[in-house]
Image (tube, rainbow, N blue to C red):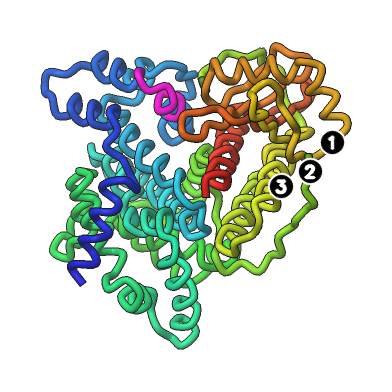
Amino acid sequence: MPQKLDQWRARLNTSSLPVFARTVRDVRHVATDKGASADDLSEVVGHDVSMSARLIQVANSPIFNLQNRLIDTISTAVVMIGFDAIKDLALSVSVIEEMLKGNMHARVAQFMSRSFHAAVQARAFAKLEGHEQADEVFAAALFKYVGQMAFWSRAEEEAVELEMLLSEILTQGGTVEEAEVKVLGFELASLSHALVDDWSLGELASNLNNQARRSDPLVSMVNQAHVLAELLADSDEDIAWEGTEVRQVLANLAKRLSLPEEEVRQLAQSNQQAAREIAAQFGIAQIEPDTDKPAHRSTSVEGSDNLLFDPDQLVPAMSMQGQMDCLREIAEGIEQDLGRDELMQCVVNGVVTGIGCTRGYFLLLSRDRAALKVKYAAGCGLAELDAYCQSGTAQQMFDQALINKFVHFENTHERPCLLAPIWISDRAIGMLVGEVQIDQSAILDLDERISGFRQLSQQLCFILTH
């Protein structure tokens, strides 16, 4: 058992999950330097455009931005939310982003969704109880199942084998842990404990898997929050809130906090909604691996996040369910070894049904790199797009996308759109496009669209390289 566990640790600590990026190392260095200032932290995080954008996005969420004032820079975030909070958020964002770069298996989203829920609940209740380490509680709750998330994000043959055995063992009344040991030789909880130490994710996160520390007030708070999140995820939500187990958890929290049970219940429900909003910013919603909802398939058509924009509103509405349906369909298709054409079509379908774009398409650069060709599309016909590409506008958009390098909103052409240049081995090979309609009567946060669009572009890259 130890040998197999050590093999997975080595695998995830080397090429699979390079969480020790320069920014994270620098953040850790600043955090442990007693002489470091808020400006030092702002400068370190500011060097990473992607992390800065994500941090600002999360910092503006209701659970962190209690004053409801616009946070548009890292410096402002440090001042308004605090040095330690931004440090913990930077580490959290880095780890979660790395998980999302792997296989978007349904269980990754499942664990991540529940972890976000537990993290928001634990932080809110820790603050009510007067703990100064409330932000550390948020990060620790998010990392409780880091081993499970890492495994399902990076596993291939082992994931298929474990998934099959899970269904068999659970049907016979067995446990998840039994299936994990039979397939892997160890429980994934052991991998979580190991990775928390390997990646220096904090003392509290390490204590969560230490039986001797179960009575620690903060450990207990995080564990209660996870119990609540799992109870609400494992059954119909409306029924679950009235269930005996959830009511018992709420009663325990009410007693612990010396508050009326109904007040704790209302706070927990508000926390759940706040958790959904934060998870949505990462393109994550609750996905159960055993869902029997039929996936929709369509026939393929052959053939810097911080940018300022005109605050016009966008329609039609973005659908997180549509986006999650698409991501689930892609994950299932990869497991079933579906053809690339069908998987690519799933991505462009998601641009329309999930992101709320009027039409989505993927443009492939020709071998001589002189022209762009429409390969997959949704919400429009091939002939219409071919004419549009030949007009030269698409080439201008592609050139602009290469300058920005990252997913961004482009509002300088006749058709405002989301653009994602697709890079394979540091070489641009094409572009994912989602056109949006401007309308003054509808309201939608553009950042959420960019976040969802980024997830789809990452899946597209995975499909092209596997």
Position in image of residue 300 (x %, y %)? 77, 48
- Residue 126: give x, y in percent of width and height: 30, 45
Label 2 with label 1: CB-CB less than 8 Å = yes
Q: What residue would you read off at disc 3?
A: 345
Q: Is residue 65 above or below residue 244?
A: above
Q: Are marks 3 and 1 in contact (CB under 8 Å)?
A: no
Please provide the residue range marked out in magenta.
Answer: 46-54
Residue kind at label 2, given as amino acid type: Glu
Tell me how far mark 2 sits from mark 1, CA to CA: 8 Å
Q: CA distance from mark 3 to mark 1?
A: 13 Å
Q: Amino acid at mark 1?
A: Leu
Q: Secondary structure at mark 3?
A: helix
Q: Which mark is residue 302?
A: 2
Rendering quarter of residue 131: top left
Q: Which image quadrant for residue 456?
A: top right
- Closer to the camera in the image, 312 or 365: 365
**Mark 1: secondary structure:** helix
Q: Label 1 belongs to which residue?
A: 382
Q: Residue at x 79, y 33 (%)?
A: 358
Inspect the magenta stretch and tell me whether residue 431 lies in it: no
